[in-house]
Image (cartoon, grey):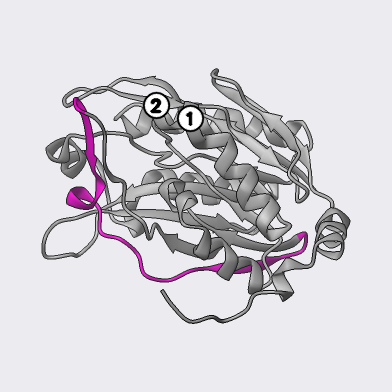
Amino acid sequence: MKAALLQLSVSDDPAANLKVTRDLLHQAADAGAGFVLTPEVTNCLSSDRAHQSEVLRPEDRDETLAALRELAGRRRLWILVGSLALKTGDADGRFANRSFLIAPDGSVAARYDKIHMFDVDVSATESYRESQGYRPGDRAVVVDTPFGRIGLSICYDLRFPALYRRLAQAGAGILTVPAAFNDTTGAAHWESLLRARAIENGAYVLAPAQTGVHGTHNGRPRRTWGHSMAVAPWGEVLADGGTGIGISYVTLDPEAITAARRRVPSLRHDRSFSGP
């Protein structure tokens, strides 16, 4: 399977972001990709909750999801919509950060709500409290496709290896990590964490990312690291998207998963233990 990782630099305008995303999806399809992946918050990146309340929609009325489902059906693609920011019915008004796997007939094959919230103090002047605007999910998700079983995750999940172990032990040989990774932590940790998750689990790791400085109408501008990355089950970096908007291509070979897990069968070697 030829996969394509889209690298975007979205604003807080869903309509404008959709046009760029659709153009790149068509370009990837024209290049022969059968599986196309977009980054976290493909529809809207904003820290202004009031603005989000104006422009975001529930899943059944989200224009980005509807358009990408239609495109998947028309171009016969598998599309991982890395995530969409969506309104929910939660009493506290928090949004969902939800990933979708869309099948070539346009149906939604799987949904995953980001479990781990990015509540961190990167520095004395840079703090994030994702849980104030988004409610966390509580369910890990794997889904079967003709080219392999996929385990879904989103961005900050990457720092929690137990999630990926669970996905791999449930049969996932492809782990998706769509992200809007902070540029400070990205420079320090992004590649190392992605390669670790691939090596630990003998799995492909596919991580389409946001990049650059993201324009906003209100609120603090956001800068993301970019470097969309595909990592092989043995840990080799197969593609690095750099810092520009664009597409990275990689060919997924199921035998590479089998070979890595045969050479180091650590998925069969977990043991229970007591303490601390």
Report the residue at 11% width, 65% height from top. Answer: 91
Q: Position of residue 19 (x, y in %)?
A: 47, 28
Marks 1,2: beta carbons within 8 A: yes
Membership of 143 in magenta stretch = yes
Part of the protein shown in magenta: 124-147
Which numbered tag is attached to residue 188? 1
Report the residue at 81% width, 62% height from top. Answer: 264
Q: Nearer the viewer, residue 235 or 80?
A: 235
Instruction: Report whether residue 66 is seen.
Output: no
Determine whether 218 is above or below 198 in the image: above
Determine whether 144 is above or below 181 in the image: below
State which quarter of the image contains the C terminus. bottom left
Residue type indicated by callout 1: Ala
Report whether 129 appears left or right of 203. left
Mark 2 Cα shell of 10 Å, populated few (<14), some (14-19), many (≥20) = some
Residue type indicated by callout 2: Thr
Q: Position of residue 135 (x, y in %)?
A: 25, 59
Report which residue position mark 2 lands on.
184
C-alpha span from label 1 to label 2: 7 Å
Report the residue at 24% width, 60% height from top. Answer: 88
**Helix, strand, or loop for circle 2?**
helix
**Helix, strand, or loop for circle 1?**
helix
Instruction: Report whether residue 194 is seen.
Output: yes
Mark 1 Cα shell of 10 Å, populated few (<14), some (14-19), many (≥20) = few
